[in-house]
Amino acid sequence: MSYLATHGLEIAGVVTTVLGIWLTTRRLLICWPVTLAADVIYLIVFYRARLYSDALLQVFFIVFTLYGWWHWWRGVLTEGEVRVEPLSVRGWFAGLAAGAAGAALLGWLMVRVGAALPHLDAALASYSLVATWWQTRKHTANWWLWIVVDAIYIGEYIYKHLEATALLYAGLVLLAVLGLRDWRRAARAV
């Protein structure tokens, strides 16, 4: 019972995150308000763990979540469903370059504020933003990037003694694989 008392907020974050991502794999609009709740919860969890890049990432996730909710909702109104969109080679390179630039800048800042694991956390946060942007734009490529980023996050969270979150991210890798499979099927069905 003491684990639940100590890690209750983290567990609430795990539950809402899993539900939000599962709903996203199904391309259901309700994924966005559930994800918004998870963003707010994990902002607090990561701030308390001094993973400041991840805490800052949650602020950006809140903005992206609101944008994604609006963008998907607009698509559902005009097309009747959430349609998957292809990502160009140029889009791939631009996203990966933006992630690298963001990692360098955020890593530099996090060293100065005394964050735990400043460069690793910054790189993961930066590439998470790229994956989230691709997700809001309905690009299947988001799932490929999530698989890589989430797999690396597992080790970071184990190191920081956030075991429930590490377990969550192991599950997120599996959900990303399911999302990739389902979104690729949806793209082929068009």
Image: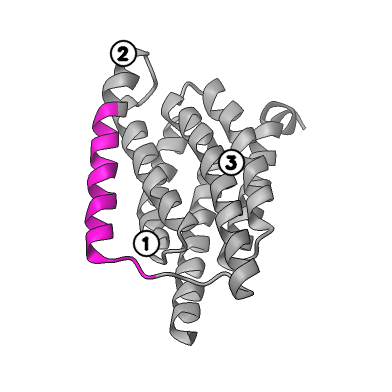
Q: Quadrant of residue 22?
A: bottom right
Most foreground residue, 178 or 35: 35
Type of the residue with mark 1 = Trp
- Within the magenta stretch, is there residue 170? no
Q: Position of residue 94 (x, y in %)?
A: 24, 52
Q: Position of residue 26 (x, y in %)?
A: 60, 69
The image shows residue 65, relative to residue 106, as above or below, that is below
Cβ atoms under marks 2 and 1 closer than 8 Å: no
Q: Quadrant of residue 100?
A: top left
Magenta residues (range)? 86-105
**How many callouts does the rendering have?**
3
**Residue 27 in view of the camera:** no
Q: Position of residue 134 (x, y in %)?
A: 41, 56
Q: CA distance from mark 3 to mark 1?
A: 23 Å
Reading the image, the residue beneath label 2 is: 112
- State which tag comes first along the sequence, 2 or 3: 2
